[in-house]
Image (cartoon, rainbow, N blue to C red):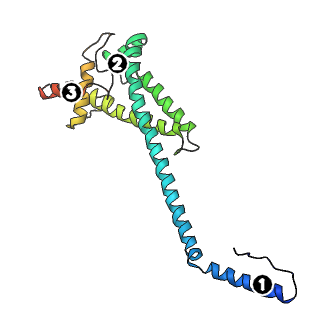
Amino acid sequence: MLLIGRECTIGESGPKSSTLGIRQGHHRLLRSPYFAQKPTILRSELIVLTVEVAAVTTLQFLGWIVIGFIGLEILSYALHRWVFHGLLWRIHRTHHGVRHGPFERNDLFSLAFSAASIVLLVRGLSDPIRSPEFGIGVGFTLYGVLYFIVHDLFTHRRYLTFRSRNFVLRFLKRAHLHHHRSQDKEGCEPFGLFLFRYREFAESGRSGVNND
């Protein structure tokens, strides 16, 4: 073991020679391969650790976004089937009847979902990448944007005429229009915009059903 920086006090010649030997040993140790490479090793370890933490944090953030998106679709399905076509049918039926003007009372539900997204985003704004609220809020927002494009613009052609030959868009439109075949409170499947029995509507598409 090396004692660095400690001097002896026995005699006149002893302290000087002991201190000199310790200092020489100290300098040799600092010039050794271990200490010469240690700063580089520490920097490399720090970089690896930083990358690992960033990767885990990013995956967690993306995970919360996915949870928010899928969770809102499941929630929308449940609300649509058992609440909108139940207790709140008087509001929702404006979406199943003839629309007068650019808006309908059913739009209140969209405003409620938008408000929930804003609240989550604001709550997680202080630390957005690590905040579950912010990630879920982003998922809600992405869902809302896709819902507006697929449901309002493409399927029901509200606000502007939007046409596309895209297979996915036409597939989702065909399924949702099947839901609108019923004007009754009981309704019919699919109650979800993205959550439904895909095989059933894929077969109806192959049978030549036109959804234009």
Q: Position of residue 96 (x, y in %)?
A: 31, 16
Q: Which residue is mark 2?
A: 95
User: What residue type is disc 3 on?
Assistant: Arg
Q: Nearer the viewer, residue 158 or 81?
A: 81
Q: Which quadrant holds the C terminus? A: top left
Label 2 neighbourhood size at 10 Å, few (<14), some (14-19), many (20+)?
some
Say whether disc 3 or disc 1 marks the residue closer to the N-terminus.
Answer: 1
Mark toward the viewer: 1 or 2: 1
Q: Specify the quadrant of the image occupied by residue 14.
A: bottom right
Separation of disc 1 and disc 2 at Cα? 93 Å
Q: Which residue is mark 1?
A: 18
User: What residue type is disc 2 on?
Assistant: His
Q: Specify the quadrant of the image occupied by residue 38.
A: bottom right
Mark toward the viewer: 2 or 3: 3
Q: Position of residue 160 (x, y in %)?
A: 30, 32
> From what the image shows, is residue 17 above or below residue 206?
below
Say whether disc 1 or disc 2 marks the residue closer to the N-terminus.
Answer: 1
Marks 3/1 in contact by CB < 8 Å: the verdict is no
Label 1 neighbourhood size at 10 Å, few (<14), some (14-19), many (20+)?
some
Q: Which residue is mark 3?
A: 199
Residue under the point 75% across and 86% down: 20
Label 3 neighbourhood size at 10 Å, few (<14), some (14-19), many (20+)?
few
